[in-house]
Image (cartoon, rainbow, N blue to C red):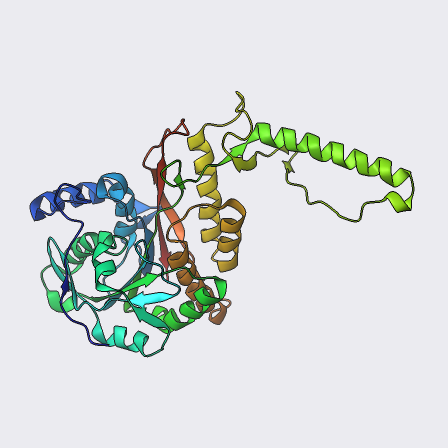
Amino acid sequence: MSLRGTRDDSHAGGKNAWYYADPPTLTAKLDEYLEGVPDAIDGISLPVPRARAVIAPHAGYSYSGRCAAWAYKCLNLSAARRVFILGPSHHYGLPGCALTSFAEYKTPFGNLVVDEDIVGELWDTGMFSEIPTWADVAEHSLEMHLPYLYKRLEQTHGGDKDKWPTIVPILVGSTGMRAEKKFGNILLPYLKDPENAFIISSDFCHWGPNFEYYNYFSLTAAREMEKREKAEAEAEERERAEGPDKTRCDKKTKRVKRCGGELEPALVSYGVFPREKEDMEIHESIKMLDDQSIAAVETGIHENFLRNLKQTGNTVCGRHPIGVMMAAMEALNKENLGGPQAKFKMVKYDRSDSELKEATKSSVSYVSFYSVV
């Protein structure tokens, strides 16, 4: 696969800019975000030793820049010779994974060079397609990480570009569990190499009319559903008492749960049940949705994450890049039983509307993780 040309920093500057195109202004903003992150987390100085993989958001910097700074300050690039960047495809239907055809990616600070040898190796597996040029330029999920990466490379290596790693941009489309495991196994040899780092691009819950997602944890709904389940159970008991021929064969799964005697809120579409005083605010429900997805990621078990998404429908736009990376880490962990296990650890959570209370408005969640590999 022959690489050619330079991809423009298409989301920088202009009327609808996602971040500043002016280098001094952008530098000041990124410095501000990075300086807002403590120098140590849980007693570990940053960057975290051997933290070669991160998950970070990809929205405009005014929304997610502060959150992303936590992932980038954790990311250790001191030994990196290549940085793989996995992001979701927002602009065209992609059934698997695709590779860039550009030789370089432009940032306001300068260009980052694509690793032609690694792209060629991946291409030769026969598992990857080529990102259409127009889609590559339109896609923000890869681009939004490049100024941060450039900045951190400057902080790590200064102006000695000979020490700077190349990049390997990969778009991940609609992949199921089997496909994610296949791509995870393809990336496994690269994950084993301590000279490779990985940036996984994802926002978390997209809630509200902009995204047509309204799942909500409702205590009122749980109470009503529990009443219905109790009434159905009593009806079944009456039928059972009338004789075996009246017994129902279908066994219904309970939709409501109790924990320590306390009724747990049920996940329903917002507005289906009237909201009572004891019900949580929308932003609290969104956090509960994200907390469950974050916990699933932190288990390090690929299937746990997929199960959570199926149960909640949480609109994690980078679910497939995360899935591919979790599959690769899980494969690595199986080879290293009894040794250190690679798992993501969440370090920062934020939302575009941290106090959302009205279903007429929307919110996007941002999360930063790192993993020692």
Which residue occupies 92% across, 42% down?
243
- In the rendered view, does 273 fall on the left or right side of 104? right
User: Residue extending furthest right?
Assistant: 243
Question: Residue 63: where, in percent of width, then height?
Answer: 26, 39
- Does any portion of residue 269 appear in the rendered image? yes
> Percent x, y for residue 33?
21, 42
Residue at 36%, 31% in the rendered image: 361
Q: Check the picture and name the quadrant holding the N terminus.
A: bottom left
Could you say where residue 4 lies in the image, as x and y percent from the top left?
A: 15, 71
Look at 34% across and 39% down and name the residue there.
350
Extreme-bottom residue of the structure: 124
* Figure quadrant of residue 6: bottom left
Residue drawn at the location 43% of the way across and 64% of the way down: 329
Looking at the image, residue 2 lies above or below residue 215: below
- Residue 280 on image: x %, y %: 49, 28
Task: Name the quarter where the C terminus is drawn.
Answer: bottom left
Can residue 38 be seen in this snapshot? Answer: no
Specify whether 324 is left or right of 132.
right
Residue that extends furthest to the top in the rendered view of this protein: 277
Q: Determine whether, in the image, residue 94 is placed left or right of residue 10.
A: right
Image label count = 0
